[in-house]
């Protein structure tokens, strides 16, 4: 079988940096009690009310093909949500329902890139970004953001890579860094997009998890709605990771083409999961705050536990469900550090190298276990780091 | 926003031939009692037992990210099913769960084609085939099958187009024609594939709906397992169209690459719908026969109703949920014919042109309404055609 160059090149030939994650999984399978701080997934399940709504929808007959763009009621609810949060006029014609945020991301890149065309994205980055660009035959171009800048990207570094590119992907609140992009950062990205005629793909799946400052959608900046795709999802905001319901929002004329792609990728999303999502959105902001609250709480616990520590430095996380710890004082690479932490203390964290080159010397801690063991793990990581430094 | 050539070219610039379908939908929305014979979807809903299994799975906690390749238990069940039906040794490493058969089809083309590369498919064809090839930047190449051959493709016509192509897509039992490919046809396709080093994508989603002869999977022919991707789905066999659960099966070394694509397209399929599918497969062959039985029954009703008719000729459908009627005796194009039938008798059928150029002068009738109105509609179509001829 002669496979395409595209499919054999998706991983870029390199390691995906997730060996530690797999090693931790292996240890757990062997019965070892590992404290798992690697995964961006809530320690609660999807709310029973949402699951009951899904079942009622299925029993009510929503088991046939749903319309490929998504059911109107959910598209309208998402449009209203986006309009409320960004102030940008948004109708259902601007919204397509996708099989999770990842499918929206894939659709956005496919809508923008032909084979060999370049897309910028910010390093450190969520694991699938470069592979998604490569999956459509595009060329992913990382632009480093720096720990000392709080992982906010700089105009001049993006500008240096932007000539000839078609798009830039940003993610705020950010996984893995916890950065929430400032208005200044977003204005710089908007200026860049206008200067180089780039489209912006704005991954905002953590938009309900903001601990400091405010989430600003770049789509709301002057002139940006016409060149921005927004990626959203029920996964993080409503603890519905496994349901695979998300959306892509953008200019109407672009969406008219994207729907043709969705016909050929998945032929729509299950009607009953869409109705479950609609029900979930109807639970309102109080519910979303309830889902976000544990991460807010654990962030505060970590800040307290790490105050005054020298060896391990907590980068103030402004949003999302992760902490970035600067462990450069140990002199170890983050892969070696994470490997030792797993071996010796049975705590699994993600090495910064798993997210590109810009987070070397850092580890990502997912705040996705209950408060007491979380706090204990943070204290143990601090002691472990101190002993190494 | 500068969109990609790929996305703006998905429809190939032409009409998709589904105007009649949309017109019928419009009439129904206006309250007109239209007999709808256009859609490949059962007139029953998904079985309650399957929906209850889905709910139990969700309540049991299968609401987080499922493994991207699919849950092992479902991959194993699908592998066992394929092995039983084809005799080809199949393990879970040969099977990836996808968001319906369409997602499997997309993945197969992406695995095989780079931009500008050619893939053959047989005309008449299911609506998404050329758009799926175009969605990954490939060039779809139709090969005509002929009414007088029972819509079985001929070696020499495929051979004439195959030089330089990477793949051929076949579909048996066939939508829209109802043809079930004979062993001779499949051997010719195998010979073609070996001669031109083509991969075969074999869409077998109707494999439980065979009325005459037997379904043969080309994967079972000598030397073909290593060059065949099989597309399967729960949609037609288990009346689970809306659940979006399907699979791609193929050589292990290819699947190892395809999983990288699935990471970046959908990041897996909902665990609870996978467990529902597993439960559905466990209902066994008797259940599948129960789902197929109405189409078998209606086919017999149509054969009886159309026996001895001169103006409308029923092409003996060997499988799937459709009839092809040859209406060339009327001298009308099938679009004009279907338009008049809808206007004057309020019966909606699909013009052959909706499925390519090879089914001109034919209309496709979906056997997807209850027996009595179905039989009445067939008799009315016969009388209508007779009056025109």
Image (cartoon, coloured by chain):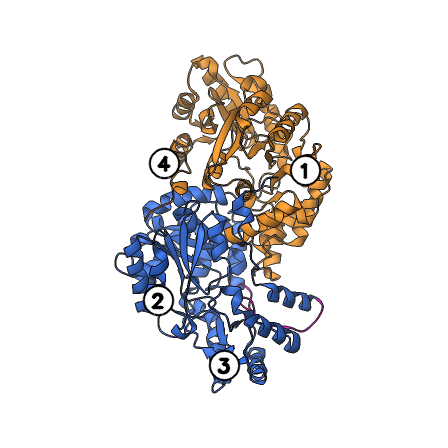
Chain colours: A blue, B orange
Residue mark closest to the camera, 1 vs 2? 2
Mark 4 or mark 1: which comes first in sequence? 4
Residue holding disc 1: B225
In the rendered image of this protein, does residue A58 appear above or below residue B169? below
| Secondary structure type for disc 2 | loop
Residue A159: x, y in percent? 33, 60
Q: Residues within 10 Å of mark 3 (few under 14, many from 20)?
A: some
Q: Do the CB atoms of the residues marked 3 and 4 lie less than 8 Å apart?
A: no
Query: What span is in magenta?
Result: A30-46
Residue mark closest to the camera, 2 vs 4? 2
Residue holding disc 2: A154
Residue A106: x, y in percent? 46, 51
Q: Residue at x 48, y 65 (%)?
A: A357
Residue B343: x, y in percent? 38, 25
Q: Do the CB atoms of the residues marked 4 and 1 lie less than 8 Å apart?
A: no
In the rendered image, the residue lying farthest to the left is A222
- Magenta includes A268? no
Residue mark closest to the camera, 3 vs 4? 3
Q: CA distance from mark 4 to mark 1?
A: 51 Å
Dominant SS of magenta comes to: loop
Q: CA distance from mark 3 to mark 1?
A: 56 Å
Residue B147: x, y in percent? 54, 19
The residue closer to the viewer here, B253 or A292, is B253
State which chain disc 3 sits on. A
Residue holding disc 3: A301
Q: CA distance from mark 1 to mark 2?
A: 52 Å
| Secondary structure type for disc 1 | helix
In the rendered image of this protein, does residue B388 appear above or below residue A106? above
- Determine which of the numbered discs, if any, sits on residue B30 in the image: 4
């Amino acid at each position: 079988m002669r496979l395409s160059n595209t499919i054999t090149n998706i991983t870029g030939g390199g390691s995906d940096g997730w060996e530690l994650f797999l090693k931790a999984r292996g240890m757990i399978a062997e019965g070892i009690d590992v404290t798992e701080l690697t995964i961006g997934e809530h320690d609660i399940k999807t709310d029973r009310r949402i699951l009951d709504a899904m079942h009622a929808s299925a029993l009510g007959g929503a088991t046939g093909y749903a319309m490929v763009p998504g059911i109107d009621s959910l598209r309208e609810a998402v449009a209203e949500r986006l309009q409320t949060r960004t102030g940008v006029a948004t109708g259902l014609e601007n919204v397509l329902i996708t099989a999770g945020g990842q499918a929206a991301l894939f659709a956005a890149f496919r809508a923008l890139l032909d084979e060999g065309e370049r897309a910028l994205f910010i390093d450190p980055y969520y694991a699938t970004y470069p592979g998604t660009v490569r999956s459509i035959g595009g060329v992913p171009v990382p632009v480093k953001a720096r720990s000392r800048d709080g992982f906010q990207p700089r105009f001049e570094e993006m500008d240096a890579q932007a000539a000839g590119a078609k798009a830039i992907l940003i993610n705020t609140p950010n996984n893995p860094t916890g950065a929430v992009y400032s208005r200044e950062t977003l204005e710089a990205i908007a200026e860049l997009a206008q200067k180089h005629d780039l489209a912006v793909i704005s991954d905002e799946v953590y938009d309900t998890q903001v601990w400091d400052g405010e989430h600003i959608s770049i789509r709301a900046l002057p002139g940006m709605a016409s060149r921005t795709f927004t990626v959203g999802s029920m996964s993080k905001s409503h603890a519905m990771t496994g349901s695979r319901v998300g959306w892509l929002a953008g200019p109407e004329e672009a969406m008219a083409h994207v729907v043709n792609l969705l016909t050929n990728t998945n032929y729509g999303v299950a009607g009953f999961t869409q109705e479950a999502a609609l029900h979930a959105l109807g639970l309102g902001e109080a519910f979303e705050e309830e889902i976000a609250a544990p991460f807010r709480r654990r962030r505060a616990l970590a800040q307290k536990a790490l105050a005054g520590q020298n060896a391990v430095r907590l980068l103030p996380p402004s949003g999302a469900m992760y902490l970035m710890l600067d462990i450069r004082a140990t002199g170890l690479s983050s892969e070696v550090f994470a490997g030792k932490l797993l071996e010796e203390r049975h705590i699994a964290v993600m090495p910064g190298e798993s997210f590109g080159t810009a987070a070397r010397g850092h580890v990502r801690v997912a705040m996705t276990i209950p408060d007491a063991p979380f706090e204990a793990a943070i204290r143990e990581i601090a002691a472990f780091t101190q002993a190494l430094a």
